[in-house]
Amino acid sequence: MKYVGMLTQQRNNNIKTVLLLLLFPAILLGLVWLFLILTNYFGNGVYDEYGNVVNYIDWDTVNYYFVQSIPGVIIGVGIWFLIAYFSNTYIIRHSTGSRPLERRENPRVYNIVENLCMTCNMPMPKINVIDDPMLNAFASGIDKNTYTVTVTTGILNRLNDEELAGVIGHELTHIRNKDTRTLIVSIVFVGIFSAIISIAFRLIWNTFLFGGDRNRNNKNGGAAIIVILLIAAVLAMVGYFFALLTRFAISRKREYVADAGGAELCGNPLALASALRKISNDPGLGHVSRADVAQLFIIHPKDLSQGIASFMNSLFSTHPDTEKRIQLLEQF
């Protein structure tokens, strides 16, 4: 495997991450435009000389309504984004069952975190713990007031000091590189598409159940509503698919950078490689049902519970292959 230096990894992945993040609003606005095209096409029809309906697209109308819809889309997404962005700390703690770890409970981990923070001249993050005998860890937060390193009791008890320093160095690198903020942004955008899908199918279901009587004298109107909602749902699914691919690419690239940064911080790449081997054999945290939260873990749990949306997530990897990560660390 070709050796790639840490600075090169950071520079390349930072550039790619910026480009990938720019795809999210582009995908959303592109799908709005496509939705207007399809609804305009199916809503416009004229009869030809043979009595057949011929549909057409009124481009002036499509573009007019697209321009008119941009402020509404931006405001709606902005409100959603702000709510999800600033509630992420509660969501993560609730999903994982983490709690603040007091210094008196485990001065060892506090000493390790403080030493590493002094080495890289960064503020001390909060430290949370999950009462779980398995091994895992993750970083979270959007600013210096919310940056947090979370570890399981298992990782504290089963890793030696050098291995634990490597893991914590990995998580501190996520914070230093603003990875946690970047991933939360990508998770929020994926959630927007997921919500649109859910709302569209719920409205379709309600139309079937409760729209029959109201639309008895207006069957074409009821059918048109269902067609419009189906178009919205299908387009949202397309957006969800591409948003997921973008989110996965961001996540995989960032893990390599964090491994390199963690190895530099702890000064012992082989210790981090050893820790990754131990964690991969027993990552635990299978009780975390949110795939977007599990994406933050240093190694994705093997026994993650799967729902419908999570099943789609499982088709793509949020983390690079652990063996490849270990091989890169062993080259330092």
Image (cartoon, rainbow, N blue to C red):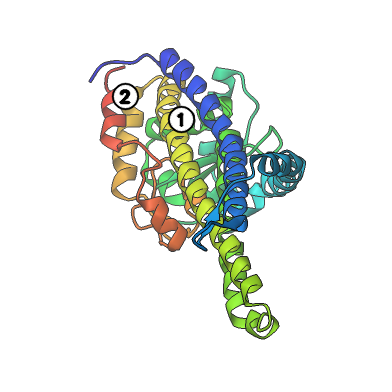
Decide: is 50 above or below 328: below
Judged from the image, the secondary structure of the residue bearing numbered disc 2 is helix
Mark 2 closeness class: few <14, some 14–19, many ≥20 residues within 10 Å: many
Left-right relation of 77 to 242? right
Residue 244 image position (x, y, % from top left):
47, 44
One can see residue 127 in this view: no
Query: Residue visible at 36% across and 22% down?
Result: 268
- Which quadrant holds residue 107? top right
Residue in the foreground of this view, choosing between 140 and 182: 182
Front-most of 330 and 195?
195
In this view, the residue in front, 230 or 317, is 230
* Numbered label attached to residue 98: none
Q: How many marks?
A: 2
- Mark 2 vs mark 1: which is more N-terminal? 1
Horizontal side of residue 327 vs 85, given as left or right: left
Amino acid residing under circle 2? Leu
The residue indicated by pointer 2 is: 329
Nearest to the eye among marks 2 and 1: give it.
Answer: 1
As displayed, is residue 97 above or below residue 111?
below
Amino acid type for the residue under numbered disc 1: Arg
User: How far apart, in angstroms, are the residues tagged by discs 2 and 1?
Assistant: 15 Å
In which quadrant is the N terminus drawn?
top left
Q: In this rendering, is residue 244 above or below 118?
A: below
Image coordinates for residue 61, horizontal then vertical, percent:
70, 44
Q: Residue at x 38, y 33 (%)?
A: 163
Count residues near mark 1 (Cα–Cα under 10 Å), then give few for <14, some for 14-19, many for 20+. many
Residue occupying the far front of the picture: 49
Drawn side of residue 329 relative to residue 127, left or right: left
Instruction: Report the residue marked by disc 1.
Output: 254
Residue 166 location (% of width, % of height):
41, 30
